[in-house]
Image: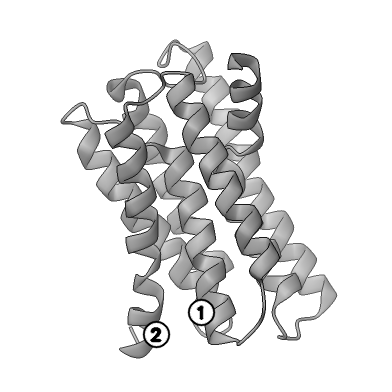
Amino acid sequence: MRKLSQLISVVLHPVFVPLAAVIIFFYKLPIYFDSAIIYSKIIATLIISVFLPLVFLYFFRTLRLISSFELPTAKERRLPLLFFMMLDLVIINYIFELYNYQYLFYFFWSLLLASMVVFIALFFRFKISLHSLGMSSLLTFLIILSFNFQLNFIYTIAFLVVCLGLVSSSRLILKAHIPSEVIFGVVLGIVTQLTIPIFKYYKM
């Protein structure tokens, strides 16, 4: 069970959430974009949100700034999370501008807001689960798209609900978090993503 939980934690790692959201946006919505633009945005997201975080985690590990890639303590999570927030700002400012990609723009802003809450909580030694936060953010984002575009994503939504349950359970089985940290991650992901329609309504 522990090995399965480790596998689930890797496959459903939060670094893949931004890439998944971008792919969903471009391939599930009835909005036309030139294929060259789609590929360039996906590749940029892959590099910034997946490749660079993994490289820098390895760099932090080499310098012994972190004891393992699991980031077991609240203190070890601060520097990597701060770096991830900087990458999020790069995506917001240079990859998905508000005018053409408003849903992704708000999605990444919501992720940044959630990351700020997680960062602050670390100073109180409260490790909000990034796995449950990431999956609940992606799930809520998809539900918002389904509602706003009147599209039936029921099977994808159901799949993400299962993924959320699996990854949350895995984090508990691995004793990476206490239940309140996992639950808080789920709630935080939902609440921050609900800022998308609010920002859209008030034309932020």
Q: CA distance from mark 1 to mark 2?
A: 8 Å
Q: Residue at x 44, y 71 (%)?
A: 106
Q: Is residue 155 above or below residue 48?
A: below
Q: Secondary structure at mark 1?
A: helix
| Residue 97 visible in the current orientation | no
Left or right of 156 in this view: 68 = left
Mark 2: few, some, or many residues within 10 Å (few <14, many ≥20)? few
Residue furthest to the right: 35
Q: Is residue 29 above or below residue 125?
A: below
Residue 39 in the image, given as x and y percentages of width and height: 79, 64
Q: Secondary structure at mark 2?
A: helix
Figure quadrant of residue 150:
bottom right
Q: Residue at x 49, y 71 (%)?
A: 105
Residue 166 in the image, given as x and y percentages of width and height: 56, 37
Residue 132 in the image, given as x and y percentages of width and height: 45, 43
Quadrant where the image shows the N terminus: top right
Label of residue 200 in the image: 2
Q: Is residue 15 above or below residue 1?
A: below
Quadrant where the image shows the C terminus: bottom left
Figure quadrant of residue 29:
bottom right
Residue position for label 1: 102
Q: Contact (CB < 8 A) between labels 1 and 2?
A: yes
Residue furthest to the left: 124
Q: Is residue 124 above or below residue 110?
A: above
Give, as a three-letter code, the residue at label 2.
Lys
Q: Residue at x 33, y 80 (%)?
A: 198
Q: Residue at x 53, y 26 (%)?
A: 57
Figure quadrant of residue 75:
top left
Left or right of 126 in this view: 52 = right
Looking at the picture, tell me which residue is in the foreground, 169 or 100: 169
Give, as a three-letter code, the residue at label 1.
Gln
Q: Upstream in the sequence, badge 1 or badge 2?
A: 1
